[in-house]
Image (cartoon, rainbow, N blue to C red):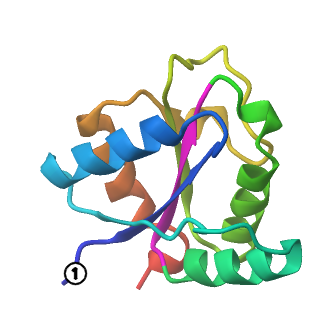
Amino acid sequence: MADPRAFISFDFDNNGTEKILFGGQAKNSRTPFAIQDWSSKSSLPQAQWEVLIKDKINKCNMLIVLVGKSMATATGVVKEIKMAKDQNVPIFGVYVGGADTSSALPEGLQRNRTIAWDWEKIASAIDQVMTEGKNKQ
């Protein structure tokens, strides 16, 4: 069976570096999942962006939200979380860029489903989401 696919949601304006590091570390970890870099590569009209991203999220087994300190201003992340929920795609968050349990979370992401950037915890979260939502057999 192929590794589960993860859509990575992040604050484009503030956490691009963390997204790159997360993806690079994921390739070298023992955590069994594949990150699909399906971020929009260009600026698109809102309606076109929404159709494109919704389709990409639907092709994944989970949505991982990289939660940075400025997450409250990331409206695209909130939309991606809603798209995932609407399609029954499980979601969890990972604190990045100095964010922690006192940092604001984007609407729709639960605090008890947001964890530290620790690959053992991430592996456990992936195992958990693979038994939820559209991943159930």
Front one among 20 and 94: 20
Image x and y of residue 131, in percent: 41, 67
The residue positioned 71% from the left and 27% from the top of the image is: 70
Direction from residue 80 to residue 24 in the image, left or right? left
Q: Residue furthest front?
A: 42
Direction from residue 71 to residue 10 in the image, left or right? left
Q: Identify the image quadrant of residue 88.
A: bottom right
Label 1 Cα neighbours within 10 Å, binned few <14 / some 14-19 / many ≥20: few
- Secondary structure of the residue carrying tag 1 is loop
Quick check: 71 above or below 131?
Answer: above
Q: Pointer 1: what residue?
A: 2
Quick check: 86 above or below 114?
Answer: below
Image x and y of residue 129, in percent: 44, 60
Quick check: 2 above or below 110?
Answer: below
Quick check: 63 above or below 49?
Answer: above
Q: Identify the image quadrant of residue 121.
A: top left
Main SS class of the magenta portion in the image:
strand
Amino acid at circle 1: Ala
Callout count? 1
Image x and y of residue 30, in percent: 12, 50
Direction from residue 59 to residue 106 in the image, left or right? right
> Could you tell me which quadrant the C terminus lies in?
bottom left
The residue positioned 45% from the left and 78% from the top of the image is: 136
Image x and y of residue 56, in percent: 57, 79
Front one among 8 and 17: 17
- Find the magenta span and give its range: 60-68
Magenta includes 4? no
Front one among 80 and 135: 80
The residue positioned 37% from the left and 71% from the top of the image is: 5
